[in-house]
Amino acid sequence: MADKYLRFKTVSMLLLAATMLTACEQAPQQTKAMVSRPVKLFMVGENSANRVFKFPGSVAAVKQADMAFEVPGRIIDFPVTEGELVQAGTVLATLDPTTYEAERDRARAERSAAQTDFHRYQVAFERKAVTKQQLDIARRNLDVAEASLRQANKILDDTILRAPFTGRLARKVVEDYANVQAKQTVLILQGDDALEMKVHVSETDWVRGKNVDTIDELEINSHIHVELSTLPGQMIPAKITSFSSMADPITRTFEVTVGFEAPEGASISPGMTGRVIYELPQEPSQVTLLVPTNSVVYAQFNLLLVPANAVLATTDKTSFVWLYDQDTGTVSQRIITLGDPVGDSIHVKSGLVRGDKIAVSGTRSLGDGYPVHAMQE
């Protein structure tokens, strides 16, 4: 009996040992190898860096006038309608001239009386019947009367509102037969031949080829276009017509005005939205930034730019990217020091060198040592 028990115990121990050995041998087989993930790779410093800068804005007419009468009164005639194209000198509106005509007639009568008095005093002076002082007073009264008549004629003429340039009546601000005050806008006239778009650009986004003394010396106009929201994909040639050399004290941006002409067959009106598009004419690693000072100064910086969406941050706010190792086919965390943003890219001060490859897609699901491969586009 004891021998049977001993044999049973020995067999049980052998079976337990075999089971444990089998489990140890199968354990490594249950660990699955990590599958290489497709990611979009970006080579630092290559020409495919984001070289396009987009600035939102709205269309405006180069010529625009808020038309108003110089004198108060009641409008009696509005011969033009909204949207109508008018020539320079066209009558746009007329005030009731009755009161001003009466003032003109009074001034005309006073001028006539002063002129008669002056001639009488002039004859009397020649006959030595009056003094020279009396003649001078008569001459001065005539001058005052003539000035009053000119002023009355000017006021009467101001009851007629004429177009200062050829343009289109954009909007009537007041109703027909309304009583208006002097300097009160009654309609808006806009030029129909040239358009512009005003945008606000940060100092780090505003790029230049070189220092210039005048607008005419700019060499980047061939790289500037306007794209309208209503005409997506249609690049309209444009050029810079003016820019401020002092930053806005609140937004710290510079106002830039870009002029363009409506393409043939397109009806573009002021108020439409769009954006100014500027493509760097040079290597993205060599960007000339505008430095705001009392005068316009330009400084050249060699910048290393990477897409902003490739940059992540650790829990302690340290910036990093996933650096790709071509030999091992894996990525590793690379700590970097950032500079200012430039469009949709960002300046890397240190941590990367030209030629490094970094992941720019699926970055939040990566980790140290993760195998990846270039995504096929």
Image (cartoon, helix red, strand yellow):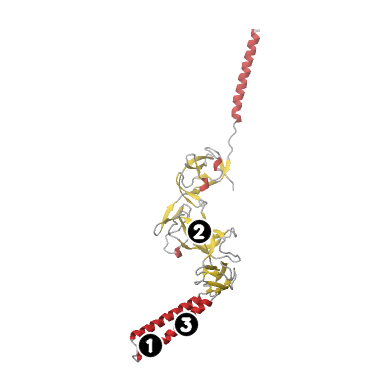
Provide residue 4's location: percent of width, then percent of height.
66, 10
> Rounded to the nearest whole Å, what is the CA distance between mark 1 and mark 3?
20 Å
CB under 8 Å between discs 1 and 3: no
Crowding near pointer 1: few (<14 within 10 Å), some, many (20+)? many
Q: Residue at x 56, y 72 (%)?
A: 75
Q: Amino acid at mark 2?
A: Val
Please rate how many residues cluster around mark 3, counting C-alpha atoms within 10 Å: few if below 14, some from 14 to 19, many from 20. Answer: some
The tally of labels here is 3
User: In the rendering, at what x and y percent does residue 366 appear?
Assistant: 55, 40
Q: Nearer the viewer, residue 79 or 370?
A: 79
Q: Amino acid at mark 1?
A: Tyr
Q: Residue at x 64, y 8 (%)?
A: 3
Label 2 Cα neighbours within 10 Å, binned few <14 / some 14-19 / many ≥20: many
Q: Is residue 133 left or right of residue 362?
A: left
Whether residue 4 appears in this view of the structure is yes
Question: In the rendered image, which residue does mark 2 sit on?
Answer: 199
Q: Is residue 170 above or below residue 364?
A: below
Residue type at mark 3 is Arg
| Residue plotted at (61% across, 24% down) | 23
- Report the Cα–Cα distance between label 1 and label 2: 67 Å
Residue 346 percent location from the top left of the image: 48, 49
User: In front: mark 3 or mark 2?
Assistant: 3
CA separation in Å, label 3 and label 2: 53 Å
- Considering depth in this image, is 81 or 77 the residue closer to the camera? 77
The N terminus - image quarter: top right
Pointer 3 with pointer 2, Cβ within 8 A? no
Residue tagged by mark 1?
121
Name the residue tied to disc 3. 108
Secondary structure type for disc 3: helix
User: Mark 1 falls on what kind of element?
Assistant: helix
Please, which residue is most extreme toward the bottom here?
127
